[in-house]
Image: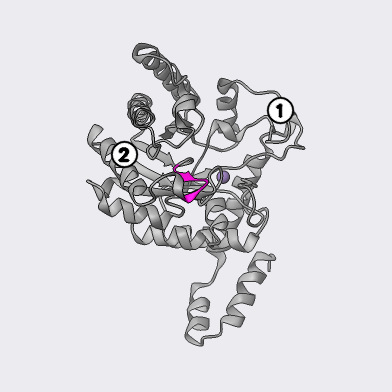
Amino acid sequence: MTRNYRFTFGPWNIGTGSDPFGPPVRPDLPFAVKLREYKKLGFDGVQLHDDDVCPADWNVEQTRRGCAELKKILVDEGLFAEFVAPRLWEHAQTIDGGYTANSEADRRYALDRSKRAVDIANMIGTRDIVLWLAREGTYIREAKCPIEAPRRILDAVNMLLAYDKNIRILGEMKPNEPMDQAYLPTPGHFLALCYKSADPKRCGVLIESAHSILAGLDPSDDIAYALFHEKLWSVHLNDQNGLKYDQDKSFGSVDLRRAFNTVWVLERAKYGGCIGLDVKAMRTTKPEHQVKHLANSRAIFLRLVEVARSIDSSKVERLRAERDYESLELYIVEKLMGK
Ligand SMILES: [Mn+2]
């Protein structure tokens, strides 16, 4: 049953438990040690920021060597690189955003760093570039021009599409945090931008459950809409307890019904992309348990696949035809309760 889905996560999903209010509570595992956990946990691929591969200030030759070293480890571990994402939110030159920064020199830094992420992607063997536009937004409306900002994001996307004719751009949208207001807060916003790009066929989205929930949407509807456009190229499945900071809780751990909706939609669409589980361990988790949230999220996903496959679609069709959604609801909820 599992052969339909390939599972991935990023090295940041095994973390030290630090948060804005407290320091690390678990030792920071070396990247190579984390990579040894993947196969044991039933995962197949690695999601990467550019500086997960090698430091952002390395020169061309150092970068080439760093990529070759990681590529060898991935091959030895039987893993693949799913995507590379330029980390445009930690450097001093991205304080005011990357592509939408008011400083021309800072925008140039963001573009150059993004091109370097494409080079890294080529060297480690993936064509997918994920853009989480973390700081492309504002704390106050008048800080930047909100009409010019999407133009600058579009120009950056076009620049990357022209830089390499093989890569695909996947926008990962989030309505807030770290910014108060993001310019492109939902996947729908980025999808509109895809069609204005120089090559719409190579522009799509990665959808994260928590981000949709933070926008007040059911992730399954965002996912279904992107599937309709044939532009759902990756997911970050997790869970989120209401409108607060981005929690990255284990998939299905807050709202099992909502998680089922997502799995049901992916199953119906025969979604063929990776299942990225962007989940974070609780701060209270002991070092010896620090990968349980990944194993648990995968197990919950696969259990929900079983439930989705056990749904009698002729029964669903009959209840739809009778407009008996009350019975349909009970049928689904009883399935979730193990009946
Ligand atoms: Mn998140």
**Magenta span contains residue 268:** no
Instruction: Return the x and y of residue 160 as percentages of the image width and height.
Output: 29, 36
| Mark 1–mark 2 CB contact (< 8 Å) | no
Above or below 58: residue 314 = below
**Rendering coords of residue 231 (x, y %):** 35, 53
Q: For disc 2, does the CB lie below 8 Å from ligand 1?
A: no
Relative horizontal placement of residue 313, taking residue 280 as reference (left or right): left
Look at the picture and state if 60 lies above or below 203.
Answer: above
Number of numbered discs = 2
Position of residue 153 relative to residue 324, above or below, is above
User: Residue at position x 77%, y 37% from top?
Assistant: 284
Question: Which residue in the structure is indicated by mark 1?
Answer: 24
Q: Name the residue tied to disc 2.
A: 156
- Which three-letter amino acid code belongs to the residue tagged 2? Ala
Q: Nearer the viewer, residue 65 or 306?
A: 65
Q: Secondary structure at mark 2?
A: helix
| Numbered range of the magenta stretch | 136-141
Mark closest to the chain's N terminus, 1 or 2 = 1
The residue shown at (26%, 52%) is 196
Q: Can I make out residue 198 in this image? A: yes
Measured Cα–Cα span from mark 1 to mark 2:
35 Å
Q: Quadrant of the C terminus?
A: bottom right
Expressed as whole percent of the image width and height from the top left, the position of residue 146 reads: 39, 50
| Place of residue 117 in the rendered image (x, y in percent of width and height, measured from the top left) | 37, 28
Q: Nearer the viewer, residue 77 or 129?
A: 129
Could you say which quadrant of the image residue 115 lies in? top left
Specify the quarter for ligand 1: top right
* Disc sitting over residue 112 in the figure: none
Q: Between residues 338 and 175, which one lies in front from this camera angle?
A: 175
Instruction: Kindly identify the amino acid type of the residue bearing the numbered disc 1.
Output: Pro
The reply to whether the residue tagged 1 has its Cβ within 8 angstroms of ligand 1 is no
